[in-house]
Image (cartoon, grey):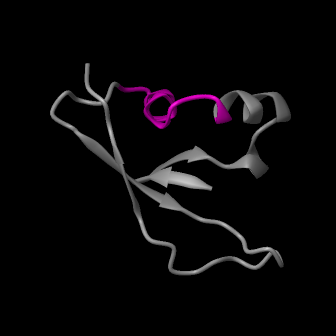
Amino acid sequence: MLSSGLSLLYAPHLLRQPNRAQDLKRKVSELYETVTKSKIPSHVHSLVLDFMCKDLEGNDVEDVPFIKYKLQKS
């Protein structure tokens, strides 16, 4: 599961199969703008992402560090 702030950007268990494949091909910034229904302001240079995952045995992994996703501005 991938989120930024209160916005859930990607959660495979909550999506229908066609949407899941489509979302995996999209940029994180595109997902963010779609989910939040707003453009990322020009003064924002990065997003802080929270990532939740499971290990090979299916147990939740705790203490996964935040991800700083740097945006490319045109």
User: Residue at point 63% right, 56% down?
Assistant: 1
Nearer to the camera, 65 or 19: 65
User: Residue at point 64% right, 77% down?
Assistant: 61
On screen, residue 28 versus residue 13, left or right, reads: left
Nearer to the camera, 49 or 25: 25
Q: Position of residue 16 (x, y in %)?
A: 81, 35
Q: Which residues are magenta?
A: 24-38
User: Residue at point 71% right, 27% down?
Assistant: 22
Which residue reaches farthest top?
74
Nearer to the camera, 26 or 34: 26
Q: Main secondary structure of the magenta part?
A: helix
Q: Position of residue 31 (x, y in %)?
A: 52, 33
User: Residue at point 47% right, 60% down?
Assistant: 50
35 in magenta: yes
With respect to residue 67, does 16 lie above or below? above
Q: Quadrant of the C terminus?
A: top left
26 in magenta: yes
On screen, residue 37 versus residue 25, left or right, reads: left
With respect to residue 10, does 67 lie above or below? below
With respect to residue 72, does 55 lie above or below? below
Find residue 54 and report its image quarter. bottom right
Q: So how many labels did they put on this image?
A: 0
Q: Position of residue 19 (x, y in %)?
A: 74, 30
With respect to residue 37, does 4 lie above or below? below
